[in-house]
Image (cartoon, rainbow, N blue to C red):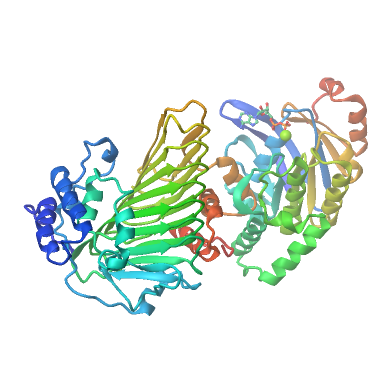
Amino acid sequence: MLKIKNLHAGVEENEILNGINLEVNPGEVHAIMGPNGSGKSTLAAVIAGKEEFEISEGHIEFEGEDLEDAAPEERAHKGIFMSFQYPVEIPGVSVTNFIKTAINESRKARGEEEMPANKMLKLIREKSELLEIDRKFLSRSLNQGFSGGEKKRNEIFQMAMLEPKLAILDETDSGLDIDALRIVAHGVNKLRSKDNAVIVITHYQRLLDYIIPDFVHVLQEGKIVKSGSKDLALELEDKGYDWLKDEVVPQ
Amino acid sequence: MGSKHTENIDLREKLVSSFLAFQSHVDVDHPVHDIRSEAIRNFEIKGFPNRKEEAWKYTSLGKLQKIDFSIFPKKVNALEYSDVKQYFLHEMDTYKIVFIDGIYSSYLSETTHDGVDICLMSAALTKPIYEPIIELYFNKAAKGEDSLTSLNTAFSKEGAYIYIPKSKAPIKPIEIIHFATGKESSLMLQPRNLIIAEENAELQIIERHQSLTSNDVLTNAVTEIFAAKNSIVDYYKVQNDSSNASLIDNTYISQKQGSAVHVHTFSFGGNITRNNLNFYQDGERIDSTLKGVTILNNKQHVDHHTLVHHQQPNCESHQDYKGIYADKATGVFNGKIIVDEVAQKTNAFQQNNNILISDDATINTKPQLEIFADDVKCSHGCTIGQLDEEALFYLRARGIPRKEAQALLMYAFANNVLESVRIPELKLRINKLIAEKLGVHLGFDL
Ligand SMILES: Nc1ncnc2c1ncn2[C@@H]1O[C@H](COP(=O)(O)OP(=O)(O)O)[C@@H](O)[C@H]1O
Ligand SMILES: [Mg+2]
């Protein structure tokens, strides 16, 4: 589904990603862990198509197509979704109007009709119940004045509404208490199927108790320095990242 | 081209000499006529303002003065309601004071004398029963030295007259609409409005100038609003006129203790629009609110000059103007706040935020603070920027294409000024106008 080969990317002369290789197949859950500043958010943003980052080498393929020239909205239309580490506050646009617009723009791009209002309402009700989101919340301005936890839950609500093929969750667990974490994990697990995949970016093992990964990768200084099974996450929790500094980079 | 441009016509001279003819149509023995005569003298001396004056640095009336405007409407023109329905807030019931080419249209209007007076300036300026009120209020808030105000005063004859007695409130909002039919190739209009809200009175007004063709129209309007103790006045100006219609709007508001006057100005169209919005606070615990949304494209020009004069302690003023400028549009915001020495504990807030979406668009924004009291809270800020790239990426990452995402952000940027619009039907209308003006279908009902 997603194939990243020797990806180098950065801002101007500053290289942030130095040769990432990653393959994600349908049905899989991959966890990416790593210290602050190692390039996790950059990787997520590059996959989502953020134009600020320049790709100097390597490429990203999604379902066999090179993503190089695809605009962020086109990637979204293909089924790529990124849950933002820092969701942007947009005063004046309600959560509901935002999600309706997003869904209908995606449908339009695929040559489909707009979703009928009653179906949209039903979907909103269903997904907000799944994520235990108060209906009043949906008429508020997007992310404005939301707590950290509310922002993250709102991201997952959007994911549930859009039903992407590939979901990249960038530190969705930070700012969540244990109850919220469970709710969010439940929302993510609901989406999982043999046809779609999830990349979970996290600092902590905690979230991985609920969203169980098939693979765990460690990112350091813009490189994947180690990959393994879910046990690697436990090991990292125990030992931290420093011991990996001496590891040989897998080719 | 509908307009006649001739080199030797001087609009000032034409206006001054027209005053003689004008006098034969009004009662020269009425006390107001002395005020008119003095006003024409002031205009004759001062003439039109020019760009050497600081207040007119960015707005030129030069081209307009070359047009051979008709000063008096020649004949009564009629309009069918169905043809102009779209310009009314027809989604709801309203009182209506409607003028066609400067002449009152009883056919399109709905006035009342039932407990409140919602009627005509021509009646107020001629009928003896109104004389005491006219003597008390007429031209008392308007600034006599301003030449364009003087020009309007000299020719004051018609407009809206609204008087709301103590503790009364009309049962529905009042629409004041001026249509220009274009039957005259170029027409100058000078409506004069007087609005009085007595103690505890409350009212809502929506004002609109609408030219129906591309012929030249120049409107030089003066509105005086008197808000007595604890009264509440909401005034909405909808400026979405055709590309050859220019407007100079001079609004003077005199407020007494505990009153609240909110003026919203929505500027979406027209050729040259100049808004001189002046608030004078004469009492304590006064709230003056000035809000504006300006969205311009092509070569449209809007100049907002606001003044809030705090003359008493413990009052507030809130100014929030948002502007979006595309193509070669130009905007001006000049916000003047005066706080007199006695006006302690004044809380004056001013904000002007602008987005330029083309390299050829310009905005000149300037706060002008003259503060003579020491215990005041006064904040002001202005920004000129482009759209937030982070926010754009967020929307695009959710599948909203760049153009729609930009429109959505601009809509959101302008939209928070609408929160204080207290007529839901109007709010919806303005929302639609904003979407239309931004040229997008937002994928949801606004
Ligand atoms: N827009 C940017 N401009 C310059 N440097 C950036 C930018 N975004 C990220 N970086 C740098 O790239 C590195 C990786 O950042 P990031 O991907 O956010 O790390 P992580 O998510 O792993 O904490 C950091 O050193 C950060 O300062
Ligand atoms: Mg990060």
Front-most of residues B252 and B13: B252
| Residue B44 at x, y percent in the picture | 13, 47
Q: In the visual, does A203 lie left or right of B196? A: right
Front-most of residues B50 and B14: B14
Residue in the picture at 32% in, 62% down: B242
In the image, is residue B412 above or below residue A58? below
**Location of residue B268 by image quarter:** bottom left
**Location of residue B443 by image quarter:** bottom right
Front-most of residues A43 and B279: B279
Question: Where does the C terminus of chain B fall, quadrant-wise?
Answer: bottom right
Count of numbered badges drawn on the protein: 0
Ligand 1 found in image quarter = top right
Is residue A3 shown to the viewer in this render? yes
In the image, is residue A10 above or below residue B116? above
Q: In the visual, does B354 lie left or right of B245? A: right
| Residue A10 at x, y percent in the picture | 62, 31
| Residue B173 at x, y percent in the picture | 47, 66
Residue in the picture at 88% in, 44% down: A214
Residue in the picture at 78% in, 59% down: A127
In the image, is residue A227 above or below residue B360? above
Is residue A211 shown to the viewer in this render? no
| Residue A72 at x, y percent in the picture | 61, 48
Residue in the picture at 45% in, 52% down: B228
In the orientation shown, which residue stands out farthest toward the left? B8
Question: Where does the N terminus of chain B fall, quadrant-wise?
Answer: bottom left
